[in-house]
């Protein structure tokens, strides 16, 4: 999986890797550079 980029736009269903965990986007969203957004359950669902 590609590394999560806090400034990238993601589409629902996209999968990324961050700190050894794979996350699936729960909704379409545009990152704003906030490093904590990967932990927002409204945006990302941890799979591993």
Image (cartoon, rainbow, N blue to C red):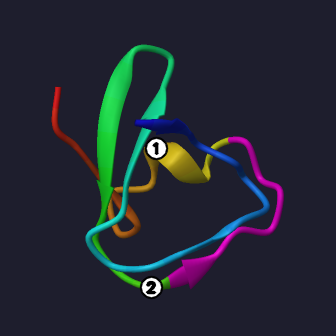
Name the residue at 64% across, 43% down. Answer: 36
Up/down of 41 relative to 4, above or below: below
Q: Residue furthest left?
A: 47
Q: How crowded is mark 1: few (under 14 residues within 10 Å), some or many (20 or more)?
A: few
Tell me the quadrant of the picture where the N terminus can be found: top left
Q: Name the residue under label 2.
A: 28
The percent coordinates of residue 14 (x first, y second) are 35, 64
The answer to which quarter of the image holds residue 48 is: top left
Name the residue at 34% across, 24% down. Answer: 21
Magenta residue check for 31:
yes
Up/down of 9 relative to 7, above or below: below
Which of the two labelled residues, at mark 1 and mark 2, occupies the earlier sequence position? 2
Gap between marks 1 and 2 measured at Cα: 15 Å
The answer to which quarter of the image holds residue 33 is: bottom right
Left or right: 1, with 35 as reference point: left
Q: Is mark 2 on a helix, strand or loop?
A: loop
Q: Nearer the viewer, mark 1 or mark 2?
A: 2
Q: Mark 1 points at which residue?
A: 39
Left or right: 8, with 14 as reference point: right
The percent coordinates of residue 47 (x first, y second) are 16, 37
Left or right: 35, with 40 as reference point: right
Name the residue at 44% across, 32% down. Answer: 17
Kindly report the secondary structure that dominates the magenta region of the rendered protein.
loop
Q: Are marks 1 and 2 in contact (CB under 8 Å)?
A: no
The percent coordinates of residue 5 (x first, y second) are 69, 48
Q: How crowded is mark 2: few (under 14 residues within 10 Å), some or many (20 or more)?
A: few
- Magenta region, residue range: 29-35
Up/down of 18 relative to 32, above or below: above
Name the residue at 45% across, 85% down. Answer: 28
Give the label on residue 47, or none.
Answer: none
Q: Which residue lies furthest to the bottom in this view?
A: 28
Magenta residue check for 26:
no
């Amino acid at each position: 999986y590609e590394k999560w980029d806090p400034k990238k736009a993601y589409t629902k269903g996209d999968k990324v890797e961050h700190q050894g965990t794979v996350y699936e986007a729960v909704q379409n969203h545009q990152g704003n550079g906030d490093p904590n957004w990967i932990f927002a359950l409204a945006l990302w669902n941890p799979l591993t």
